[in-house]
Image: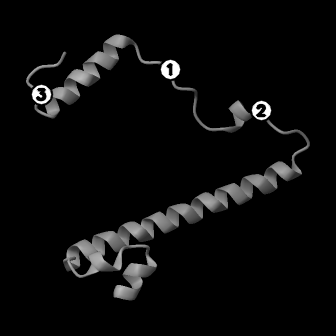
Amino acid sequence: MLRAYVAAGFDPAAFWSLTPRLYFAQMQGARDRLQREQRDRSWLAWHVAALMRADQIPDFTQFVEGAAAKPQPPEVQKAMVLALARAWGADEVT
């Protein structure tokens, strides 16, 4: 178990203080991360190959998913700061 824990990229010194439940949760998280990284590499390889075959390279903004983020109005920013302050137990926000 220690060998698998270290192979997953975790600190061997932390292994001895883990409960079985924490060990399992960390190993599942590591597995999920590795699967996501593999999926990302596959996506990249597929798109590189597709772009190499393309007669014309698409515009970058059209190629990349999602639209550009719009700036938040000051009122929204202030409301978010106040909500965070309340959540963190601040008595007063200046």
Q: Closer to the camera, 40 or 90?
A: 90
User: What's the amino acid at mark 3?
Assistant: Ala
Instruction: State the SS at label 1.
Output: loop
Q: Quadrant of the C terminus?
A: top left
**Within 10 angstroms of label 3, few (less than 14), some, or many (20 or more) residues?**
few
Q: Is residue 1 visible?
A: no
Asked if disc 1 and disc 2 are in contact, CB closer than 8 Å, the reply is no
User: What's the amino acid at mark 1?
Assistant: Lys
In the picture, the disc for residue 70 is: 1
Q: Residue 80: which quarter of the image? A: top left
- Dot 1 or dot 3, earlier in sequence: 1
User: What's the amino acid at mark 2?
Assistant: Asp
- Dot 2 or dot 3, earlier in sequence: 2
- Dot 1 or dot 2, earlier in sequence: 2
Q: Closer to the camera, 49 or 16?
A: 16
- Give the residue number, with chain letter if any, for mark 3: 90
Instruction: State the SS at label 2.
Output: loop
Q: Quadrant of the N terminus?
A: bottom left
- Give the residue number, with chain letter if any, for mark 2: 59
Q: Position of residue 90 (x, y in %)?
A: 12, 28
CA distance for labels 1 and 2: 20 Å
**Badge nearest the viewer, 1 or 3:** 3
- The residue drawn where x is 10% and y is 32% is 89
Q: Is residue 40 visible?
A: yes
Q: Position of residue 73 (x, y in %)?
A: 40, 13
In the picture, the disc for residue 88 is: none
